[in-house]
Amino acid sequence: MISEEEARRKIFEMVRPLPARRSSILQALDRFAAEDYFSRLPLPNFDNSAMDGYAVVASSCKKGARLRIIGEQPAGIDQRLHISRGEAVRIFTGAPMPDGADAIVMQEDVTRNGAEITVNVDVDPGDFVRRLGCDLAEGQKILAKGARIPAAKIALLASQGFTDVSIGGEVNAAIISTGDELVRPGEKIAPGQIYESNSVLLNGLLQRCDATVISEEYCPDKREFLIDAINGGIKNHILIITGGVSVGQHDLVKEALHHLGAQIDIWRVAVKPGKPFLFGCIGACLVFGLPGNPVSAFVTFLQFVRPAILKLMGAANLDLPEVPARLTVDVTNDGDRPHYVRGKLDHGRFTPVGRQESHALFGLSQSNALLRIAVGESLKAGEIVDAQIWD
Ligand code: AMP
Ligand code: MG
């Protein structure tokens, strides 16, 4: 049995980011940038009005001043208007500032009289002017290699005239659920059987990582069936097998993998839940064997499979997001493995929920965060802890 750190190190050693690909900026949502991007234009890229109103020369614009309107500048092509003291240009939000103007008076702050306005406020230079480059300078880094691309970054890329970007590769995944007891939801169940739930759990988690699920298979605990199913699954970047990786005599996954010439790098990790976790590869396919117990499958997916997928996709940050939270009860780990406690994170408070056992799917379903308790660690109610969140 190896430590989690050792397991992660071995996994990362095996995982190479997939080749980058070009994508339209829209399709790049939530993917990872494969290179650094820099601004081509400052933002704003010209001085412009922040309001509908009048462009003026501030020094000729004390309260009560009367100004002559000499033209109109809507948003759009710069009409290259020029004003002098005592003059104003009717202007609209986003329109380029006329030459000579250094401030905008809001239309609400003037009284218009034909081709003239009376200014009802004092005006200072710079009022309601959006200066060239005040938000972003040309040549500034706008997206770092390995960073996720959320909607606002897509908008920023568009504002710079980019139509497409280079992003990390797409990860294809196969799932195999093993167990003689498993029955597909919707089918009739006999005594001793259970409805299979890990494949939908993993499918959901894979979707959250933006991996593409290519196939999902059920497989009884029979060596030949397992070999067939695994053979089908290894055409993908990753294969996730649940169940059958423990030490029982019906746990045949390891044997089937060996038969197919797999290199098995990890079997059994000091983590609770999830000890029987297996990792290896067959050719270029990374193979993850997760325990059949749903909570174990969930925790090992988040701790070991998710970071591997992120690395394949070219992500820089492979960790689960963590948020500080105040623990509401005492928790202790008297066991010999780090324990991922399932809990509810609510308004900055973390409370363990449900039965903390590896089969307890209802308990898991009530939780939205994990708290890792190291071996021998004793945390007191009121302490601030780092809760891991996955959604
Ligand atoms: P195993 O890892 O195969 O020893 O299975 C451990 C426990 O998880 C057993 O109680 C199984 O019935 C249960 N289990 C295994 N696979 C699944 C699955 N796909 N969905 C729900 N429960 C499962
Ligand atoms: Mg089994």
Image: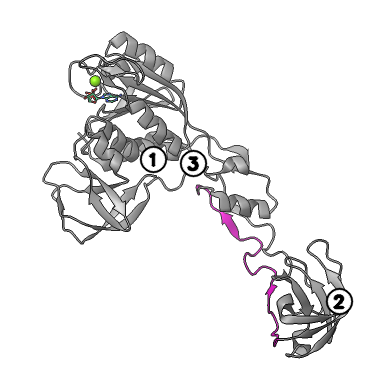
Give the residue type at disc 1: Pro
Q: Is residue 178 magenta?
A: no
Identify which residue is drawn at 63% across, 52% down: 157
Residue picked out by circle 2:
82
Residue picked out by circle 3:
314
Hey, which quadrant is residue 306 in on the image? top left
**In the image, 337: left or right of 101?**
left
- Give the structural element (helix, strand or loop) at label 2: loop
Q: Residues within 10 Å of mark 1 (few under 14, many from 20)?
A: many
Give the residue type at disc 2: His
The magenta span reads 121-147
Type of secondary structure dominating the magenta stretch: loop
Identify which residue is drawn at 12% across, 42% down: 335
The image's colouring method is: one colour
**In the image, 133: left or right of 6?**
right
Q: Which mark is residue 307?
A: 1
Give the residue type at disc 3: Gly
